[in-house]
Image (tube, rainbow, N blue to C red):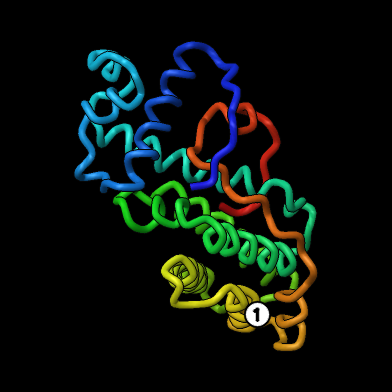
Amino acid sequence: MTSRPTILTGTKRQRTRDQLLVSAQTLLMEHSAAGLGLRQITDHAGVVHATFYNYYPDVPALITDLGELLGATHAAAMSGLGAAQLPPDIRFARITRQTLRLVAQSPGLGRLMFDVGIPPDRLSAELRLRLRQDLAEGRDLGLFSPDDIEIATSMIAGSVAGLALDLYRGTLPAPAIDTGTARLLAQIGVAPSEADRLAHEPLPLPPPTVLPMRWLALPPAGAPSEGRS
């Protein structure tokens, strides 16, 4: 698990909520969401049992919040790409590559995404929404050629998720990120030579996702955010 000292500066209520989420993430490195008990979380967080109910009605509600945090953390990680100002083909290539790189370089993140039973709804919903917007914009600009945006969105989102899973499992090596991105671009109508160029454009590696994730570590509500998550 990647970690670094984090100074929590929010209200006491915000800090306690984050601490419950931090404890859950730590425990999920060895347990599944279904096997995680309320007492385990509160004992690890160093709070009394009753405190938990000031934040969540039960453990599944905390796990749902953790799924929301996972999606928001990914969105924040993508915000440094300047993606909103880019043409959709470049945006697609950069965000796809960086998303897959994050999974490949952070086993703990991959475990939270695939192995422990955290609901993927927030992460997948944001991915699909941004992806659909990119595909529609790219088609309008003549960069992409899917005849059915909804089907293309489903297929590409599924492909990205499959690549991420195989990278996490070690079934695919890291160089497959760029090759896979090029093939996805070609699948939506980008010429193979251009797809290969976009997928191999020099791009700094993103910093590893810092685990455990915290709401207090994210940009304040209302701060500009961009990119597909």
Which percent across, then down, holds residue 94? 69, 63
Up the image or down, 163 lies above or below 213; here it is below
User: Label 1, on which residue?
Assistant: 182
Left or right position of 154 against 45: right
Quadrant housing residue 65: top left
Left or right position of 99 against 83: left
Which percent across, then down, holds residue 209? 57, 47
Left or right position of 42 against 23: left
Residue, far bottom? 192
Up the image or down, 78 lies above or below 60; here it is below
Left or right position of 13 against 144: left
Give the secondary structure at mark 1.
helix
Quadrant housing residue 10: top right
Which percent across, then down, holds residue 202? 79, 69
Q: What residue do we see at 60% from left, 82% from top? A: 183
In depth, the one of 75 and 6 nearer the eye is 6
Look at label 1 and name its amino acid: Ala
In depth, the one of 203 and 75 nearer the eye is 203
